[in-house]
Amino acid sequence: MMLLQVGMTLLAGSNLLASSHAGATVTRRLHAAVDPKMFTSAQAEHYLTAQQLAYIRPGLNITVNSVVIGADNKPVVDVTFTDDGNQPLDRAGVLTPGAVSMSFILDWYDPATRHYTDYFTNTVTSPITHNTAQQATTAAGTWEDLGTGHARFHFTKALPTGYDVTKTHTLGIYATRIINLTDPITISKTYVKDVEYDFRPDGQPVTDTWNKMTDATCNQCHDPLAAHGETGRQDIKLCVLCHNPQTVDPDTGNSVDAKVMIHKIHMGSSLPSVQAGHPYQIIGYRQSVADFSDVVFPQDIRNCTTCHQPSSPQGYVWYSFPSRAACGSCHDAIDWTTGANHKGGPQADDSACASCHQPQGENDFDASIIGAHVIPTRAAQLKGLNIQIIGMTNVAPGSKPTVTFAVTNNDGSFVDPSTLSSFSFIFGGPTTEYTGYLSERVGKNAVSTGTSSTFTFPDAIPADATGTWTLSADLYRIITLNPAPETASEATVREAAQNPIYDVAVTDAQPVARRTVVDINKCNVCHNQLALHGGQRFKVEECVICHNPENNDATYRPADQAPPETIHFKYLIHRIHTGENMTIPYTIYGYHGSVNTFNDVLFPGDRRDCLKCHADVPSGQQQTFEVPLPDGVLPTPTLRNPYVQLMQPTAAACLSCHDERQAAAHAVTMTATFGEACEVCHGTDSDFAVAKVHAR
């Protein structure tokens, strides 16, 4: 869904608008205007005038009024369809812009197995294997238009004789409304809408429904979930109507049942079968190949509640109903016939699964489902590690600062810092834009009283330091788990403390915190708990101390791979999340010679949604991704960029995503020796404001 261009050619002073459709001139009167405020700043409609909205009539909403199944067993669906102003739309797209297209799926639901069965299927033959398979599909039918915004859809095929009228039936609709106008407004946009309508053919109340997860859960990362091109299909409940056990890919033999396919997609490169050299692929429409073998889930796959959230009425299914299909989708090295890679041996059916795999046992890492999915760093046997910065003294330029702090367990008991496996302080500044930092290992150099500790930096704050500096710390202890996971490498874990953030005034009268650009809570929506550099660095506020404009990977990059690459935070994060869409390679060399290449990263959301990562601000204030940037923000040396080797502050943010030659040329053209001109066109409320050009 993308708004390409909106013209300003409405007929001024008139409430009548004329346009030409298929050779016929249609005159329509403006209805009550849709309020632009009903749209968020991430939607293109937010920036249109009331007149433009009245003409375009944005949106698509569908209401199922009834489903009637007569004596001939052929369903008839009565539907109405409106715009976002609740005004009727012309299905043909003549009286109102954009024809409305709808496809219908009809299934019955089995509460015992918790999956759907589609009444209509196709038999598909693979041109590769010549195998045939059954696939759920949409229903054929004819339309009966009852008036603008109101119609009936008559199914062509009848339901089978003797179908169970007491079962919950779900009608699924996926619909599109495609607007392509050139007069009087130039606009191109596709609206999509999915509907799921539960009913019982016998007219009794529906009591059994599918509700394992919500669209909002999927859209935490996918922003929004959308499959099969621009034909809608954005609701997870709509997906499972076809992605049920009926449907198989004849080319690969893979099931596309949702509980199998979704698990396998999210496991991706971690699937045992993929690691053994067998790609995970689904071959779809017109032999298109979807290869999920490179997918990397952005958090620990054992976080089952990321998708199966307790807020969903059936969010408990992941631990209550073990089955070979669901469990074997991730653990796909198991051979259920021979029992290979399964301690319980061969399993002819699912009847014995729950006898061993109960919902929850007594210990971490046992055979219970919840126990088997415990993440080692969250084992119940860990005590929890915390640090509190009590204060700092001797923080003037040229001085060696002293920190007073306390390390504790979750129960408040004191932890001697000398017993930790690793403990370092990081002290950097200024907060206007970090340029330097001190990093000191504490080790046994702290002095403890039994309730608190002190540590004096052996190196002094630079004599030319100014402003406010920030103190943080990385600390962890290595714990041997007992009981422990079966994987030997996970038998010991780093139990790390959350990084403290403590600002001190070096030359300022009072501490001035660094501006908040990114919200770590938003990072953790997808990452669950962002933990980098060995699982000890959790907070963006610490990341930016080291990942500052002047830092790069020169320390670790081999000489024959020079020049170094910048690791400036805003550039690095944009590059990583642009991933496979980058046109210029981005590789960082790290500790112990690790090579981190990000050109194959697939971001599951929409990068135009800047607020997916950027912090929210109070109403009326400039968004953190808008320009102009604050005073004091520094340029980014990008020595490996073939076009611009010193990016000015705004350009560094923009060109990290828009890395094409043309974008670089534009940025350079708009830059003088004394500054950038970006805000002239891209400043807040300007014609090409960042929020406007990223709106969807």
Image: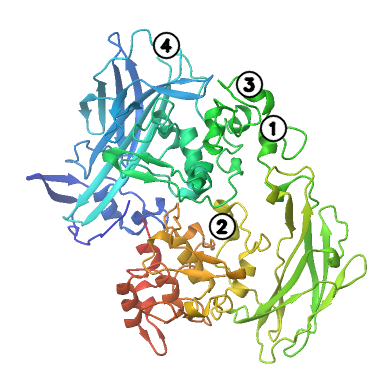
Give me the disc on residue 368. 1
- State the CA–CA distance, disc 3 to disc 4: 29 Å
The residue sitting at 58% across, 33% down in the picture is 315
Q: Is residue 69 left or right of residue 547?
A: left
* The C terminus lies in quadrant: bottom left
Please name whichever residue, 43 or 13, is drawn nearer the observer in this view of the structure. Answer: 43
Answer yes or no: is residue 7 visible. Answer: yes
User: Which amino acid type is shown beneath numbered disc 4?
Assistant: Asp
Tell me which amino acid carries mark 3: Ala
Residue 84 visible to an observer of this rendering:
no
Cα–Cα gap, marks 3 and 1: 13 Å
First along the sequence among labels 1 and 2: 1
Find residue 69 and report its horizontal and vertical position in percent.
Answer: 32, 14
Residue 353 in the image, given as x and y percentages of width and height: 62, 25
Residue type at the position of mark 2: Cys
Q: Which residue is mark 4?
A: 164
Q: Between disc 3 and disc 4, whose residue precedes?
A: 4
Residue farthest toward the left in the current orientation of the protein? 23
Observer-side mark, 3 or 2, equals: 3
Amino acid found under the numbered disc labelled 1: Ser
Indicate which label's residue lies in the foreground, 1 or 2.
Answer: 1
Residue at (45, 19) in percent of width and height: 168
